[in-house]
Image (tube, coloured by chain):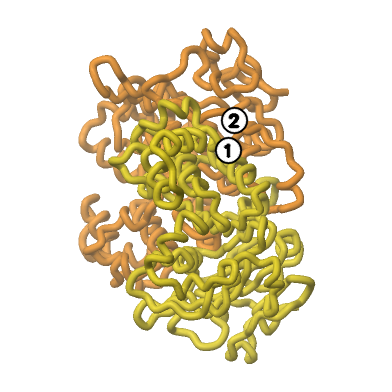
Chain colours: A yellow, B orange
Amino acid sequence: MNEPDTASSLLDVRGLEVSFGRAKAVDGISFDVRRGETLGLVGESGCGKSTTALALMRLLRDVRLGGEARLDGVDLLDLDEDSMRARRGADIAMIFQDPGTALHPMIRVGDQIVETLNAHIKLSRDEAHRRAVDLLRQVGIAAPEERFFAYPHEMSGGMCQRAMIAIAMACSPRLLIADEPTTALDVTVQAQILDLLRELTGGLGMGVILITHDLGVVAGMTDRVAVMYAGVIVETAPTTALFANPAHPYTRGLLHSIPKLDGGWDEPVPTIPGSVQGAMELSGCRFVPRCPRASEACKAVPALREIAEEHFVACWNAP
Amino acid sequence: MLERPMSEILIKAAGVARHYRLSEHRTLRALDGVDLEIHRGATIGLVGESGSGKSTLGRTLVGLQKPTLGKVVFDGLDTASPDRAALAKLRRQRQIIFQDPSSALNPRMTIGDTIVEHLRVQGWTRADARARAAEMIEQAGLSAAFLSRYPHEISGGQRQRAVIARAISTDPAFIVADEPVSALDVSTRAQIMNLLRKLQADRGTTMLFISHDLSVVAHMCRDVAVMYLGRIVEIAPRAGLFETPRHPYTAALLSAIPLPDPVRERTRVRTVLKGETPDPAARPSGCSFHPRCPRASELCRTTDPKMRPIGDRQQVACHHPLD
């Protein structure tokens, strides 16, 4: 983490800071995403996951950004608005949680794809139309020729999310950010959309940041995971290692407090006491008020340290 | 979870249907003939995807909606034609907890005033209602100091505790909990689940626990009913339902749940259903699950399967149930 292999990393984020007024929503986080890798960004609401995503997309207004985020060496935070606009959709694309509000309600779905294509690629009208229909087909929309002319309200939530994915994939971005892409969907539809994402991003060497609070989705979809708490990354590790040996007390708490499907039903569900505190109010480790292992050492901010290969944790008392 | 030995039926739905007329020729059947009995002190889980009618059933059981057909019997009382005294009792005795605690609380009222108002409507004096509010907020795991707070000043989990305090303040015999933990974060979710379990055990409240999350339901209820397009398609004790689901839809639901275990998650075989839940206003013929069902036969296209007993206390509405 401290010295990433920049040769293979697609996105390299160093000390990213996002402040709204005096509040630091994201407080100096560093991570990288490699080509062809899916990185899971997990944590509870308010921990800064979505703010991180929006900062990388440069979609936040009236905030102060700090640090750097290099996509293939180019610092996204340093680009002027025009150069950023040229990259958004082309090099870096995003899928949002609620497809119902992310799509324009009064523009036909097909035209929304065409719009993205036209913004970045020189295509004739017919060619753009054909590409859009192809994309709709690729994301598993039945009768794509007819669906091209549908408005978002004429489609189900799952269909709209497929259309959003088609828009995001239209220009084959190098980095895809999916922010809770299946949270608003039913579980059987979620399974379809996750399969689709896996299939589409798998062969392309695309880097993916998957933001989710659902540790089941993380387990099935990601190669590595970064766990966020109150604006900082508290642990990062390859997915299997994180689930097998969670080191940070917060990660452990999160994993234990998931209700199990296969037993222990009459036992109380383990909990993490309290709730997330505002980032401003605390000095030292932010998890202290909820932490079973808190000690004197926790008055100082813990930095990420490597405890196993590629497994980093920011905790003074982790094993 | 903790069932009492007595097996008296507290609430019963018999052939309950709820239709919405969309136009002259189109009727949406949100509920399409539901039979359900809940014994006193029991908690039944109700699972299904959006549009399956779970919330409509919950709202109908507490009397927020009237059934178009069929009837709801509560404690021996037909809820359709009660006299005034019976109506007051029915209101007091049946409560509902909603998914989103922010919209269930008046933003301009303190938590204390919200609970007091709820009791005043039931005829409590102001002084008694205040004392009761303080007692209830503590049972819900918050200190009495929270009574003077406004909803926006407290966290989502604390708001849900306030909503629960209000619901239990009239000592209801029956509570519908409609996705009570779905809007909450993982760590808060576990806290609220434990609170509901404790209240249920301490007070012996009968509950219908609605959730789209089967793992949450497993921790809250001994028996689980699965809904699809306005009907209950399977009902069984939780172990039976999870280990030997009989309805292909139940099996597909279970297999679609992502497990928080990368090793199992990567090796398991999934039954991914084709398509999505059909529009309840255009219900397929025969078994309404047949267009998505891997086991569908000609019979399923034409004939509606009736609910029938199968195995140990399990019931399923399917022509070709799984073994």
Question: Badge 1 sits on which subunit?
Answer: A
Of residues A85 and B129, the one drawn nearer to the viewer in this rendering: A85
SS at circle 1: helix
Describe the element under mark 2 as helix, strand or loop.
loop
Name the side, left or right, on which A4 lies relative to B58: right
How many numbered circles does the render carry? Answer: 2
The residue indicated by pointer 2 is: B273
> What residue is shown with label 1?
A192
Residue pictured at 45% horizontal, 59% vertical? A88
Q: Residue at x 26, y 60 (%)?
A: B114
Q: Residues within 10 Å of mark 1 (few under 14, many from 20)?
A: many
Quadrant housing residue A193: top right
Give the left or right position of residue B169, taking residue A173 as reference: left
- Is residue B194 visible from the viewing direction of this image? no
Q: Is residue B166 left or right of residue B250?
A: left
Mark 2 or mark 1, which is nearer to you?
Answer: 1
Foreground of the two, A69 or A310: A69
In the image, are marks 2 and 1 on the same chain? no
* Residue A146 figure quarter: top left
Callout 2: chain: B
Q: Nearer the viewer, residue A302 or A269?
A: A302
User: Would you say B47 lies left or right of B246 here?
Assistant: left
Q: Amino acid at mark 2?
A: Leu
Q: Residue at x 45, y 40 (%)?
A: A163
**Which residue corresponds to the image point at 62% horizontal and 25% vertical from the top-left?**
B247
